[in-house]
Image (spheres, helix red, strand yellow):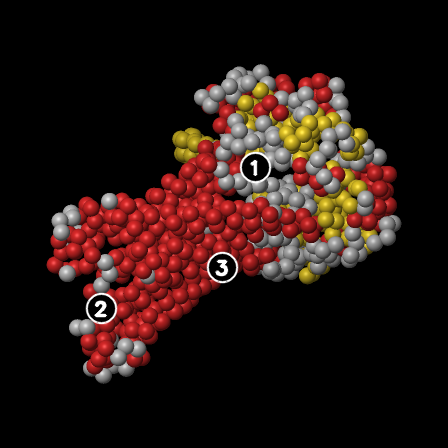
């Protein structure tokens, strides 16, 4: 039966070329946009190398010092008692009136003295980034360098094209070794092959390249850099600073997904109990923000005091826009399908007259619509691959490399089927209830 | 005739409801996209208040570690040595906020009897010359100002208009927190966040080197200066500071890279918006083509009764346009609530963008609907009455 429907569906598609073109145009472009958005979200938030364990990670790079000021408003009752004015406070209330806030990324001391003792986590790595201007052959290269602990490589599974990461021996002995990305190797050394063993000089210190990694696909500040250096090779002043504020970030890997919440809570608790250093005694409270990967992404867009608020804003806006975006092509398709099916009323009536019931007709039309959506989806899929290729080539997203994987494909397929089902339901329902006599 | 058309619309309310919803949502999308784009385009092409081209910034931390006498000496030496380079036109220290670097300082209070706020930038006596800031009134800081009893301040046009009704403010005293400043000049509006923001109150104060208020050095270079000068400048800085821990940023590049964060969504919205319009237009065209060809009988009768082609076209086009008009009217009423109820925080300039966006959406959809209705109607009206009635 479905074979017949399939045959019929393609016959109908070929019959009115203009309608078919309009439908396919709408479907394929809509699904293309959805697939590109899915690919983008998957690249930024999904579990892909180097963040394959994204759902077990807790990112911590925000510490806030705050003193809240309050206004107290008194309600005073004045009375003349025996020739003297007396004043009674009847009522008072306090309300928040501004605050003194200093927020930024934490200093290394905050991690080493306070947060590394917090349970439960498997690995922890502190890091910070700085940039170097390197002049070579009359050209300037601005390199973004990331200084990191050795455990950095245990948390993030970078794809090593050659060589190895630096290990705890390198970090303890402050050996001048470096891991570079393939892009930097190409730009700086002119090739990304046999780069290990080559040397480069940063701020007067010569580093030996011991590994080449594939550039981070997500734009996360925790993974992105041109060159990775052992933490201990950084300048002493940054490392030995006693301040709780500084340029550092920390990344924790929880033992399992279920421990993430516990780890976040424990970190927040530990943060609140950090004693305020003497040079910052103007402040009353310390709060730290320990994010999940998605929370970090959302918070970077909205910067709400409450991380959860940013997260829900992010989700609402995302799904709202997507829904709204889908609504218009769906309405358009319903409109088109409705007028299109009118011309097939005689076919329906004949089928009904020969005993087909409404449900059969409904299924047939839905089936036809899903087929056309799948055809459009295939075109959209090819277009999406093209667009993703073009975006990556043009460098429109400088720190993100979009990729299309099976997970994105699966979700897109579900969206595709849903789209076909929704846009076909109303027209198919209307047609299936048509009276036999009208059609004939 | 209008009454007749309304009756026709009512008779086909089933399919018109779909048309109505589709055009309504389409209007909302065009409104949102055009409001976003108009706002950003207008802001991007209005002046920054200084010249971004050929402006470089030297950022370093090394002198900050010195005590204040050595700091002043090192900074002066840095400036002197850089000025001595071929191709450097002027140099001035800047504090608190460097254009397009993300830093910003806002100050405010109610000491003057009303809520006042301004963003603050700081510079030495060569700052305005290096930045290329034009003054509308008054003068820029001079060497003498370092010894002035009341600290001098330069406000921008926006402050003078927003808080002081645009009157002359020279020599007035501005109170900010515990500090008092004397206004010595009024500058053009200065925008330094990312080039896409509306104008905002900004003041320039004179930085005191002894208190390490301005570390970063702005350098105006001759047009066409490239990496050679950058490297030469790098060597000079290295010789003075004895460290390579510094960065020379070319402001124009910094601005382009910051602006990309806004251009990317603008392009995405424009592409998706164009596609949605095209999608709707094609769909509308297809549906109308089909429905009008189904109304042959009606056309035949009207032609036989003596109606001109033009009248038939007008009837069809108006019939569809009225539905679209109703949908757009609902859209306009909703969109107008944004500026009328002040749903977004904005001044008159920003609100005017919303009115432009409403006007633009209305025009665009009118054009699309009439265009898509005209061709099928013409096709229908071309029918010969005999042919049209033949089937009946």
| C-alpha gap between disc 3 and disc 1 | 35 Å
Residue drawn at (43%, 37%) of the image: A312
Marks 3, 1 in one chain: no
- Select label 3 or label 2 by which is in front: 2
Tell me residue B26's x, y (percent): 38, 57
Is residue A383 toward the left or the right of residue A279 in the image? left
Q: Which mark is residue B8?
A: 2
Q: Which mark is residue A404?
A: none
| C-alpha gap between disc 3 and disc 2 | 37 Å
Q: Is residue B385 above or below residue A411?
A: below
Q: Which mark is residue B353?
A: 3
Can residue A246 be seen here? The reply is no
| C-alpha gap between disc 2 and disc 1 | 56 Å
Protein chain holding label 3: B
Q: Which mark is residue A218?
A: 1
Residue drawn at (19%, 45%) of the image: A359
Is residue B174 toward the left or the right of residue B246 in the image? left
Q: Is residue B175 above or below residue B354?
A: above
Identify the element where label 1 is drawn: loop
Tell me residue B364's x, y (percent): 43, 65
Marks 2, 1 in one chain: no
Can residue A436 be seen here? The reply is yes
* Disc 1 crowd, CA 10 A, few/some/many (<14, 14-19, 20+): many
């Amino acid at each position: 039966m479905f074979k017949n429907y399939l045959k019929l569906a393609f016959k109908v598609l070929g019959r009115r070329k203009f309608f078919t073109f309009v439908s396919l145009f709408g479907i394929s472009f809509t699904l293309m946009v959805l697939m590109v958005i899915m690919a983008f979200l998957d690249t930024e938030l999904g579990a892909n190398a180097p963040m394959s364990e994204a759902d077990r990670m807790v990112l911590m790079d925000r510490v806030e010092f705050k003193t809240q000021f309050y206004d107290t408003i008194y309600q005073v009752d004045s009375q003349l008692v025996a020739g003297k004015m007396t004043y009674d406070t009847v009522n008072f209330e306090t309300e928040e009136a501004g605050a003194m806030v200093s927020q930024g990324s934490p200093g290394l001391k905050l991690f080493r003295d306070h947060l590394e003792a917090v349970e439960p986590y498997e690995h922890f790595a502190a890091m910070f980034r700085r940039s170097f201007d390197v002049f070579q052959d009359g050209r300037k290269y601005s390199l973004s360098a990331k200084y990191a602990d050795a455990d950095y490589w245990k948390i993030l599974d970078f794809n090593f094209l050659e060589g190895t990461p630096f290990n705890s021996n390198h970090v303890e002995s402050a050996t001048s070794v470096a891991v570079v990305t393939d892009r930097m190797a190409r730009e700086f050394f002119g090739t990304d092959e046999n780069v290990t063993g080559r040397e480069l000089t940063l701020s007067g210190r010569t580093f030996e390249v011991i590994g080449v990694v594939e550039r981070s696909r997500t734009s996360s500040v925790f993974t992105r850099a041109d060159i990775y250096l052992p933490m201990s090779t950084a300048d002493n002043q940054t490392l030995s600073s006693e301040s709780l504020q500084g340029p550092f970030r920390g990344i924790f890997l929880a033992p399992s997904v279920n421990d993430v919440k516990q780890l976040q809570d424990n970190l927040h608790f530990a943060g609140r109990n950090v004693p305020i250093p003497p040079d910052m005694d103007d402040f009353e409270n310390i709060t730290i923000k320990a994010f999940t990967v998605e929370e970090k992404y959302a918070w970077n867009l909205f910067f709400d005091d409450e991380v959860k608020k940013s997260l829900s804003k992010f989700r609402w806006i995302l799904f709202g826009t997507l829904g709204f975006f889908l609504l218009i092509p769906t309405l358009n398709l319903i409109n088109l399908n409705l007028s299109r099916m009118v011309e097939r009323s005689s076919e329906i009536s004949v089928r009904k007259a020969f005993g087909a019931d409404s449900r059969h007709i409904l299924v047939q039309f839905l089936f036809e619509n899903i087929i056309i959506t799948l055809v459009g989806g295939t075109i959209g899929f090819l277009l999406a691959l093209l667009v993703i290729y073009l975006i990556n080539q043009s460098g429109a997203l400088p720190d993100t490399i979009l990729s299309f994987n099976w997970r994105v494909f699966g979700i897109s397929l579900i969206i595709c089927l849903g789209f076909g089902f929704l846009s076909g339901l109303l027209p198919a329902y209307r047609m299936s209830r048509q009276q036999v006599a009208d059609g004939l | 005739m209008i009454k007749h058309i309304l009756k026709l619309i009512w008779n086909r309310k089933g399919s018109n409801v779909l048309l109505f919803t589709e055009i309504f949502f389409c209007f909302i999308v065009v409104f949102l996209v055009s409001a976003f784009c108009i706002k950003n385009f207008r802001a991007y092409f209005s002046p920054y208040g200084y010249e971004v081209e050929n402006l470089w910034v030297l950022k370093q931390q090394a002198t900050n570690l010195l005590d204040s006498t050595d700091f002043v000496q090192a900074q002066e030496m840095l400036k002197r040595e850089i000025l001595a380079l071929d191709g450097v036109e002027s140099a001035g220290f800047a504090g608190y906020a460097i254009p397009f670097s993300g830093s910003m300082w806002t100050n405010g209070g109610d000491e003057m009897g009303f809520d006042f706020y301004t963003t603050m930038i700081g510079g030495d006596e060569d700052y305005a010359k290096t930045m290329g800031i034009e003054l509308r009134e008054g003068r820029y800081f001079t060497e003498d100002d370092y010894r002035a009893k009341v600290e001098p301040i330069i406000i921008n046009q926006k402050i003078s208009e927003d808080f002081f009704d645009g009157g002359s403010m020279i020599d007035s005293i501005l109170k900010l927190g515990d500090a008092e400043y004397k206004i010595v000049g009024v500058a053009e509006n200065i925008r330094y966040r990312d080039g896409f923001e509306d104008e905002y109150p900004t003041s320039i104060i004179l930085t005191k080197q002894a208190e390490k208020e301005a570390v970063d050095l702005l350098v105006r270079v001759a047009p066409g200066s490239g990496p050679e000068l950058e490297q030469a400048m790098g060597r000079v800085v290295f010789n003075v500071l004895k460290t390579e821990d510094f960065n020379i940023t070319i402001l124009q590049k910094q601005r382009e890279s910051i602006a990309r964060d806004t251009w990317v969504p603008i392009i995405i919205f424009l592409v998706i918006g164009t596609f949605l319009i095209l999608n709707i237009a094609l769909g509308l065209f297809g549906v109308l083509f089909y429905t009008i060809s189904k109304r042959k009988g009606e056309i035949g009768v009207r032609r036989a009764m003596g109606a001109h082609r033009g009248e038939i076209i007008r009837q069809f086009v108006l019939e569809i346009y009225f539905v679209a008009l109703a949908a757009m009217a609902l859209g306009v009423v909703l969109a107008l609530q944004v500026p009328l109820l002040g749903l977004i925080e904005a001044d008159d300039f920003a609100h005017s963008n919303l009115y432009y966006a409403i006007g633009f959406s209305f025009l665009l959809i009118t054009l699309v609907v009439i265009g898509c209705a005209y061709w099928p109607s013409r096709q229908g009206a071309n029918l010969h009455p005999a042919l049209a009635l033949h089937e009946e």
